[in-house]
Image (cartoon, coloured by chain):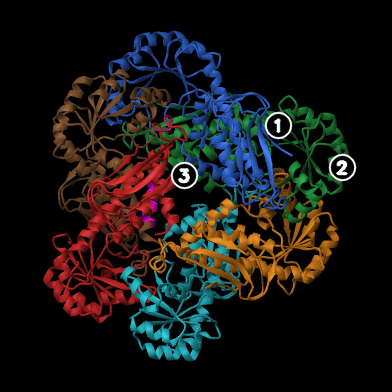
Chain colours: A red, B brown, C blue, D green, E cyan, F orange
Amino acid sequence: MDRSQLHTMLRSFLHEDIGHGDLSSEPLFSRGEEGSARLEAREPLVAAGVETVAAEVFRLQNAKIQVSGAVADGRSVSAGDTLLTVSGPVVDLLKAERVALNLLQRLCGVASFTARFVEKTKLYPARITDTRKTTPGLRMLEKYAVRAGGGYNHRFNLSDGVMIKDNHIAACGSLTRAVEILRESTPHTIRIEVETDTLDQVRECLECDVDIIMLDNMDMESMKQAVTLINGRALVEASGGVNLETVAAIAATGVDIISVGALTHSAPSCDIGMDWQT
Amino acid sequence: MDRSQLHTMLRSFLHEDIGHGDLSSEPLFSRGEEGSARLEAREPLVAAGVETVAAEVFRLQNAKIQVSGAVADGRSVSAGDTLLTVSGPVVDLLKAERVALNLLQRLCGVASFTARFVEKTKLYPARITDTRKTTPGLRMLEKYAVRAGGGYNHRFNLSDGVMIKDNHIAACGSLTRAVEILRESTPHTIRIEVETDTLDQVRECLECDVDIIMLDNMDMESMKQAVTLINGRALVEASGGVNLETVAAIAATGVDIISVGALTHSAPSCDIGMDWQT
Amino acid sequence: MDRSQLHTMLRSFLHEDIGHGDLSSEPLFSRGEEGSARLEAREPLVAAGVETVAAEVFRLQNAKIQVSGAVADGRSVSAGDTLLTVSGPVVDLLKAERVALNLLQRLCGVASFTARFVEKTKLYPARITDTRKTTPGLRMLEKYAVRAGGGYNHRFNLSDGVMIKDNHIAACGSLTRAVEILRESTPHTIRIEVETDTLDQVRECLECDVDIIMLDNMDMESMKQAVTLINGRALVEASGGVNLETVAAIAATGVDIISVGALTHSAPSCDIGMDWQT
Amino acid sequence: MDRSQLHTMLRSFLHEDIGHGDLSSEPLFSRGEEGSARLEAREPLVAAGVETVAAEVFRLQNAKIQVSGAVADGRSVSAGDTLLTVSGPVVDLLKAERVALNLLQRLCGVASFTARFVEKTKLYPARITDTRKTTPGLRMLEKYAVRAGGGYNHRFNLSDGVMIKDNHIAACGSLTRAVEILRESTPHTIRIEVETDTLDQVRECLECDVDIIMLDNMDMESMKQAVTLINGRALVEASGGVNLETVAAIAATGVDIISVGALTHSAPSCDIGMDWQT
Amino acid sequence: MDRSQLHTMLRSFLHEDIGHGDLSSEPLFSRGEEGSARLEAREPLVAAGVETVAAEVFRLQNAKIQVSGAVADGRSVSAGDTLLTVSGPVVDLLKAERVALNLLQRLCGVASFTARFVEKTKLYPARITDTRKTTPGLRMLEKYAVRAGGGYNHRFNLSDGVMIKDNHIAACGSLTRAVEILRESTPHTIRIEVETDTLDQVRECLECDVDIIMLDNMDMESMKQAVTLINGRALVEASGGVNLETVAAIAATGVDIISVGALTHSAPSCDIGMDWQT
Amino acid sequence: MDRSQLHTMLRSFLHEDIGHGDLSSEPLFSRGEEGSARLEAREPLVAAGVETVAAEVFRLQNAKIQVSGAVADGRSVSAGDTLLTVSGPVVDLLKAERVALNLLQRLCGVASFTARFVEKTKLYPARITDTRKTTPGLRMLEKYAVRAGGGYNHRFNLSDGVMIKDNHIAACGSLTRAVEILRESTPHTIRIEVETDTLDQVRECLECDVDIIMLDNMDMESMKQAVTLINGRALVEASGGVNLETVAAIAATGVDIISVGALTHSAPSCDIGMDWQT
């Protein structure tokens, strides 16, 4: 995660929440008045974005804000634990508070939800990965949170991975032809993945040496057969209908990767608050 | 919702998802190849952002994309209903698809969740409103979705509303003093709201003629007493711990406004897909 | 006034004036050469933007520039008084000079002009407020200067206030209908204002419980009758044709607010210079 | 004046005035509702920015807005004359109205004020030029308005002109040395100008072949002597203390250029309104 | 190559060259005056960016400019051939001319230079690829030109490919350890590449199953041995000291990829002019 | 060269090369790990942009990076000489490395190539200048490098110089008419230049007192005659077909300025590397 781009994002979030100024706080606090507060987990959670994101929000709002005691991203904390302590000009702590909390609640939510999928599959080698089903504008942060939760990242966007889907196949006449064309155009640093619905398509993928075979919405039995069929000649990714009930069984089929849209589009927000210290 | 700012946001979301180009689709489709697809609700939902947001994503990606049949925002649709039909250059439909879906799933999610709170309180005059607990970068869109779901908006940011909280009161010595200072500094077009924890604070608010009194995390009994006490001399807003189980009882206390952070931070994403037509 | 947005504005102003570099100063001064200068009021004026704006221009141009002795915004100064002393690399003092002066002359102009209206009405409770007739791009700064001059702010833009005008009424069929629709759509944190031309319209406003009634271009007599009629049931704003000759008489009618476009569109620029110290 | 940069400026001005939407007009007008209005001069003025700026504001807000009958920039109009007629979606006409008027009032103000200086000096060959004392953010537009009023432009910013002032001379030890250094560093496409306070400095300028000699705040007699002394060997610019009372006498001294900061920092705003047509 | 990002780049290039307006052309041409011109190759070259880039520059400057007869990117043309014909408002053709030519000369230069490397190696299967040694700000365009010239792209930037170099190995203690760590952190869609200086390092790469082995600045003999050793178990990339004299011999060693920094940092600019038609 | 604009450019270049993060370096280096490296000239060259550009790239990437020993711009160095030493967090040194080198190789290339033209003409007073044939997006930097190499700058863009070409003349009917119009519209701070193909045109230029006469692609004999004809009454600029073989002869004709597009469009890139220190 690059800090320069992070800063650009955070500045625009602060602008969204502050507008042209804080009508409530600016008239009440002299510029110099200082205070201190702690960000507290109000439920058990896996930390993500504490030092890397929330602390940066406060520092960007005013470089004079001191940040300390940040819990390491990826660490599990209990309800009542302090995630971060901030101190500095009160008016700027108040201006940054909502943005920091809104981000932290979401990122810890993604990390915590990811950790539950990871926990369910810990007996199997399969990676839990995210998808492109992220919140528009927050992809870099949410993919960071997935890693904090023990998950892995799938491609970041359309320009750093290749995925051949139905339309692509239809446009070329055959899966094999689509693979040929894209193998020719794709940088050698990037693997070619094909989305398959049937075992016949899996076989066609093997014949044309596809790097990654996605089993899209297949039932358990088909997935097992596909894994047997592929037998290590390609990476196998399961996708579609993955949830906390099904993920362990999917992992047990022997697939290498399980991609889960829900990690980012359906992770419950975590309850985190900011308490002022006196 | 202003279109110019909407466009700026949508362009940056498209950039996030497309990167420097689509490695999969650009080599496979000639620029001219056209196709058509429909965005389909895969569960019952309240529409939000169909014509206003999703259709704009497609049009911004390529002005040649034709959009039709958009379901009106605010309308309830059933699983299987078509929300929008798009047709035009296939490569651009594919480039815009993920951003349009990611936004639509979230916005319909917010509208649908809001509609459930509205439904629960339909016997009472209380407004269901959002808060500032929105997704960073999406506030304008999420607040639009709240309205589509039958809810109302609270202040947009720190510069278009005044809310006096604990810190402000502590900084001034008393609630009354904080109100005096802010009444002097606040544009006359904006009402002054005070967050109260006790009936004593409510009484102090009435004495200094506060416009809106927020009852923060009060129990039902206290809320009822507060409403009786206030007796129409200020708007009364209930806040804190509002959920689908408690909202009807809160509305029954006679408060004017119920603000619900969950509308935007915990609305479940709706299942919406894009089906290609042949 | 939020510093982050202020910085964005000031950077673009510096870019406008500096272009790709200073052809005159860069070749003549080695980077290290230091100097000192004072910004001096060349006529009596009310200070605005000295520390908050002009000093920031210098600091943004080069963080090594030291600023001291800034006169507090809102303070009246005499011809010859020093507003600010700056010292640091000469080449950067020269690059920042024109932008700092151009802003300061305008902001002190607005504050000083506002102060004259405030002085004229000091016997009456009426607030002098600005309007949206500000210089494009400078609204946040000019509204700040109005406050420095003892005035108050009206709504900042179209999204943080509601004003019902002729067109709106015509579009709905009646004033009452327009108020009903907007009361339903407007956040409860924002008051509803209606522009009236006649006492009949004032009466209609009172019947539908409008929050703020603007008396637009009414003669003194009508204003007095309107104030009597309204009798505290709404805030009363006078607008139109307000100048230094008429403002006291308008205030004497008992209105609560007098909005004056001239504060920002016709404030004479103040004469302020920068003198180098040897 | 380049349209692409103009559009960037106008979009940011519209954003400043509209915020996240128009709380008053959006709920009242269906998107399709159309109307028509005329921008009217309410006092005699010289037009500037009618088609080039104000019309663009409306078109940028919504490309469906039709613009017609624009008075040519530079033309003198009478009170009551129509400057521009606009028609299209009412909600967008209302959103663009204030920005268009705020710009037009200022630009016509600058053009009209310039025209008065030009008129006063019409018997003499001297050019009336602007300075860098423009409104931050509006330099391109205000310099355009100066031309519309019959004036001329001085350098646009620090990178397209050279002006040697006291500090520069002090830094080099002598005027002659400063000229030598800058003649060496300056592109040959740009003339070198020196600010002089005394006839001795004028003489030194002539000895080192300066292209433009500015007579800074000299009295009439000194200016006449300077013009005689220079005798066509350099362009002569008068600057400082120029106003409508003094400008003719200054022009009569025979100077080539008279630069007037007041053209942009003290031009009175013109009264222009927008009348809806029924 | 995505058009939205292309437009952002081209707009900033036009701004760089036009500044606040064209002092020469704007006063001489009425807005309506139209003309026509052809962009002509003045030496044999391989076309790149004709319709995709140069034509867009003209269209962005003014949507009224008509473009026709664009030579397809990748096509070889002779001296005197027309690459593109443009017609429309003369003032906008002149404003866009320099940017269009500057880009086209460079992009055709890259494509033509790439084509010479491709030609030299046509008997071998090796891909000629670019590197990250591109012109800052032009990477997307230059990589496009490499493809137009028959070459291939290496990773676009640090976030869509993995390359383990000396420092990385040193930081981890061993090549094997670095590979282990990065295999764990890297998305499965991206291959892992290691830069090797010796055959021992090549052997270590094979033991830990590296996807791509770069032979960095190895002599021909070592490269041949490496290819034999690797024997298809990894992609082999040759890098360092590649030029038109050595490239065929390198290709003959049997490597899969030859990456050539010179394609973008040392491609000679092509001579292309714009001729007005009468 | 203004630092604020430089920073904007450099940030966008870093973003282009880093993307959303460095997949190779971020997982391998803890944030605190420090290192040191030197940028070394691998061939003799004239330095340009060492402290001013390359060092800024490193400092912008991380303010903790220390820079020392920068060779002064304009200085000639030998192969093996150190240009700059950088030390700080390894991960940030690696992220900034490629952008710093890509810029430095190009800027030193331009300065070194310029220095060769300057050397060839050192017996004559003629200035070697650049043109607008710069790399889009890099004009400010490349023109700086030209100066570092001992050359001079021509106009920066279309708004800070006037050049009358064929089209302009054709549009007005005559060269004389074009000069009249542009003399009237051009700020007095800017000289008027005319491109001429024939001695007749040169004569017409002299008659209407043009400031700079460009001899466009004239043969040596014509240039000599033109210089004789002009005889100091205008600056004389030679342009077209200038290269290292012809430049001395052109200078010998007595022209004042020789503008060379090749300085920026065809300067060979310099070989510069970054060596890590242990």
* Residue lying furthest front: A278
Q: Nearer the viewer, mark 1 or mark 3?
A: 3
Q: Position of residue C206 (x, y in %)?
A: 31, 15
Query: Mark 2 and mark 1: span between their CA atoms?
Result: 30 Å
Chain name for mark 1: D
Q: In this rendering, does residue B6 appear at all?
A: yes
- Per the image, is B10 magenta? yes
What amino acid is at disc 1? Val
> Label 1's element?
helix
Residue D203, disc: 2
D180 in relation to F20, above or below: above
Q: Residue at x 61, y 75 (%)?
A: F42
Query: Mark 1 and mark 3: span between their CA atoms?
Result: 53 Å
Q: Which residue is mark 1?
A: D118
What amino acid is at disc 2? Arg
Q: Nearer the viewer, mark 2 or mark 1?
A: 2
Closer to the chain start, of discs 2 and 1, is 1
Q: Position of residue F145 (x, y in %)?
A: 65, 63
Chain name for mark 2: D
> Label 2's element?
helix
